[in-house]
Amino acid sequence: MILKLSNFWSGNWGSMKKQIAVCTIVMLGALAAAQDSATPISLRVGFDYPVIASTRSVSKEFIGFGVQRKVGSVGMSENYTTDLDLSIDYYGRGDYRHVPILLNYVGHSKKGDSFWSVGAGFGFIKRPIIGGTESVGRIAYQGSVGMNLSSGETASFVELKYFGSELSELNVLGLYFGVRF
């Protein structure tokens, strides 16, 4: 068992796995600190389509999923309420992977039918290079628009998301279905 764990944390993947673990722990800690029964959590799953031709020639689509939680209210206007949310997502396939951890500025229409968001943070990336793969961390960002399909204790929604990174070969346009509870 010790040998297997040491192999897991060693080699080219060692520092990347440690960074992902630390950021995940920080994110979970921030989510735990924001514990509030009235604070919704969103779970989403969908497909992402690479926007860079060289990536698209290797993989036409990626599988994606994510979780997002409100950490605070920012303000209110005539048409929107705005919040700050933390999110962690994953999308990838094969030798491509991106795990962005982002702080998002989210607007919700007061009618309850739509929402939008923009966010920035840090992304953990795996990509193919000559002779193998590379695992690095880079600045990441996203922008999205969504429509609520239902409301209530468990609401559903669809969302169109653009994920970007300093390593543009992992930039994608995604379509997601999600639930908020």
Image: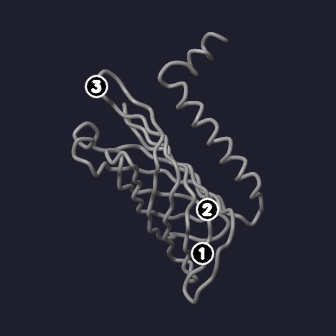
Point out the frontmost of discs 1 and 3. Answer: 3
**Picture disc at residue 82:** 1
Measured in 3D between alpha carbons, the distance from the residue under mark 1 to the one under mark 3, in whole angstroms, is 44 Å
Locate the C terminus by quadrant: bottom right
Q: Is residue 181 left or right of residue 113?
A: right
Q: Is mark 1 on a helix, strand or loop?
A: strand
Which quarter of the picture shows residue 40? Answer: bottom right
Q: Where is residue 92 in the image (x, y as percent from the top left)?
A: 41, 40
For disc 3, the neighbor class at 10 Å (few under 14, some 14 to 19, many from 20) is: few
Amino acid marked by disc 3: Ile
* Whether residue 71 is situated above or below residue 94 in the rendered picture: below
Mark 1 or mark 3: name the one nearer the start of the chain.
1
Q: Which residue appears at 33% of the width and 48% of the height?
A: 168
Q: Which residue appears at 22% of the width and 40% of the height?
A: 57
For disc 1, the neighbor class at 10 Å (few under 14, some 14 to 19, many from 20) is: some
Q: Which residue appears at 64% of the width and 38% of the height?
A: 22
* Whether residue 108 is situated above or below residue 124 in the rendered picture: below
Locate the N terminus by quadrant: top right
Amino acid marked by disc 1: Thr
Q: Where is residue 157 in the image (x, y as percent from the top left)?
A: 51, 64
Which quarter of the picture shows residue 23? Answer: top right
Q: Is residue 37 left or right of residue 17?
A: right
Amino acid marked by disc 2: Asp
For disc 2, the neighbor class at 10 Å (few under 14, some 14 to 19, many from 20) is: many
Q: Which residue appears at 47% of the width and 70% of the height?
A: 147
Mark 2 or mark 3: name the one nearer the start of the chain.
2
Residue at mark 2: 85
**Picture disc at residue 130:** 3
In the orientation shown, which residue stands out farthest toward the bottom? 78
Q: Position of residue 164 (x, y in %)?
A: 39, 53
Q: What element carries label 3?
A: loop
Q: Where is residue 129 in the image (x, y as percent from the top left)?
A: 31, 29
